[in-house]
Image (cartoon, rainbow, N blue to C red):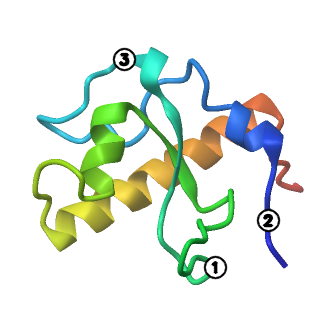
């Protein structure tokens, strides 16, 4: 089952970058989009589910996707995991994702 949400995608608009890659991040919230991160749901010409994503500025998005810079595999995994958790926390604060008590 594919997990897609227009609300989650739209929620990135105007948010702070959660990737915050050292020496890369532009801190420009005007360029932040929902960056889909690789997981088992993605494939050829198919993005990952919307929950496997993070808020990323254009510069960090390019670095994570390999279009700019050269992050090591370890650094890339660190930044993606940290950003995904930061994004989930923001979605919970916005009420877009609910966690039962």
Give residue 95's mark. Answer: none
Q: Residue furthest right?
A: 100
Residue at coordinates 19% horizontally, 71% vertically from top-left? 74
Question: Pointer 1 and pointer 2: residues touching (CB < 8 Å)?
Answer: yes
Horizontally, is 69 left or right of 31 in the view? left
User: Could you tell me how far apart the alpha carbons at marks 2 and 3 are, in whole angstroms?
Assistant: 28 Å
Q: Earlier in the sequence, mark 1 or mark 2?
A: 2
Residue at coordinates 39% horizontally, 58% vertically from top-left? 80
In percent of width and height, residue 53 lies at: 56, 54
The N terminus, quarter of image: bottom right
Residue 65, quarter of the rendered image: bottom left
User: Could you tell me how far apart the alpha carbons at marks 1 and 3 are, in whole angstroms?
Assistant: 29 Å
Instruction: Name the residue nearer the viewer: 46 or 14.
Output: 46
Question: Pointer 2 and pointer 3: residues touching (CB < 8 Å)?
Answer: no
Residue at coordinates 58% horizontally, 76% vertically from top-left? 42
Residue denoted by label 2: 3
Q: In this picture, is 25 found above or below 48?
A: above
Residue denoted by label 1: 41
User: Could you tell me how far apart the alpha carbons at marks 1 and 2 are, in whole angstroms?
Assistant: 9 Å
Residue at coordinates 57% horizontally, 18% vertically from top-left? 14
Q: Mark 3, residues whose alpha carbon is within 10 Å: few (<14), some, or many (≥20)?
A: some
Residue denoted by label 3: 28
Residue 71, quarter of the rendered image: bottom left
Q: Earlier in the sequence, mark 1 or mark 3?
A: 3
Local SS, label 3? loop
């Amino acid at each position: 089952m594919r997990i897609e949400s227009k609300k989650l995608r739209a929620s990135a608009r105007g948010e702070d970058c959660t990737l915050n890659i050292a020496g890369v991040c532009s801190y420009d919230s005007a360029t932040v989009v929902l960056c889909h991160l690789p997981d088992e749901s993605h494939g050829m010409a198919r993005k990952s589910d919307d929950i496997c994503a993070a808020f990323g500025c254009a510069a960090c998005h390019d670095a994570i996707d390999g279009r700019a810079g050269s992050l090591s595999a370890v650094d890339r995994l660190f930044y993606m995991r940290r950003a995904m958790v930061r994004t989930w926390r923001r979605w919970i604060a916005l009420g877009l994702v609910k966690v039962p008590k």
